[in-house]
Image (spheres, rainbow, N blue to C red):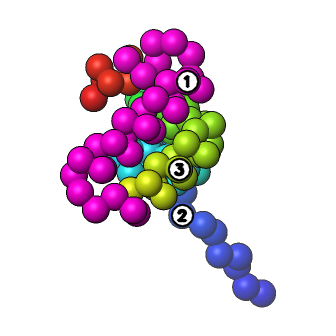
Amino acid sequence: MTTPVQAPGGPQVADSAGRRAIWLSIAALAMTFMLPLAGLVMAVFALFAGFRALPLLRGAGKSQGVAVGGIVVATVSLLLSAAATAMQLYLMNEYSAYQECRKGAGTVAAQSACFTQFRDAAAAKLPPGVIDFLGSVQ
């Protein structure tokens, strides 16, 4: 008769689950600023990792701060990436026209005119004041 193999358990698994949650959430936040859609997916993974780490940490008697921090950062990342992705989808036609304009622009003045056209088209589609707010954030 053979004995079944048991998966490792205890404090080491709980600690690694908490660290996994925080690292995934930090990666999600970084990805949000590079590729918002990838940040959205990574944030969902980080949320799952954070929520799965909570009972492990609680069962091991460890502090849940790392997992809660991962959940908070992942939630912020999820909200930012969802907003950025929604904005990209909403302004898809204007951005496509901007890209086409930039392909034909051979001078800096022509590129500047393309950006002005994009800004005006986006301002016409978005609610008043959003373009000014986004410009002040940069």
Of the residues shown, which amino acid type is indicated by label 2?
Pro
Q: Position of residue 40 (x, y in %)?
A: 56, 45
Q: Nearer the viewer, mark 1 or mark 2?
A: 1
Picture quarter containing residue 129?
top left
Between residue 132 and residue 104, name the one nearer to us: 104
**Within 10 Å of the Cα at label 1, are there few (<14), some (14-19), or many (20+) other Cα atoms?**
few
Spatial distance from mark 3 to mark 2, Cα to Cα?
55 Å
Magenta region: which residues?
Answer: 103-132
Q: Main secondary structure of the magenta part?
A: helix
Spatial distance from mark 1 to mark 2, Cα to Cα?
59 Å
Quick check: 9 above or below 64?
A: below
Which numbered disc, 3 or 2, marks the residue that appears first in the sequence? 2
Quick check: 104 above or below 131?
A: below
Q: Which residue extends farthest left? A: 108
Q: Nearer the viewer, mark 3 or mark 2?
A: 3
Residue at image x 24%, y 47%? 109
Indicate which disc residue 124 carries.
1
Q: Position of residue 51 (x, y in %)?
A: 60, 38
Of the residues shown, which amino acid type is indicated by label 1?
Ala
Circle 2 sits in a helix, a strand or a loop, which is it? loop
Of the residues shown, which amino acid type is indicated by label 3?
Ala
Which numbered disc, 1 or 2, marks the residue that appears first in the sequence? 2
Which residue carries the number 2 mark? 8
Circle 1 sits in a helix, a strand or a loop, which is it? helix
Which residue carries the number 3 mark? 97
Q: Quadrant of the C terminus?
A: top left
Q: Position of residue 1 (x, y in %)?
A: 77, 87
Residue at image x 55%, y 24%? 124
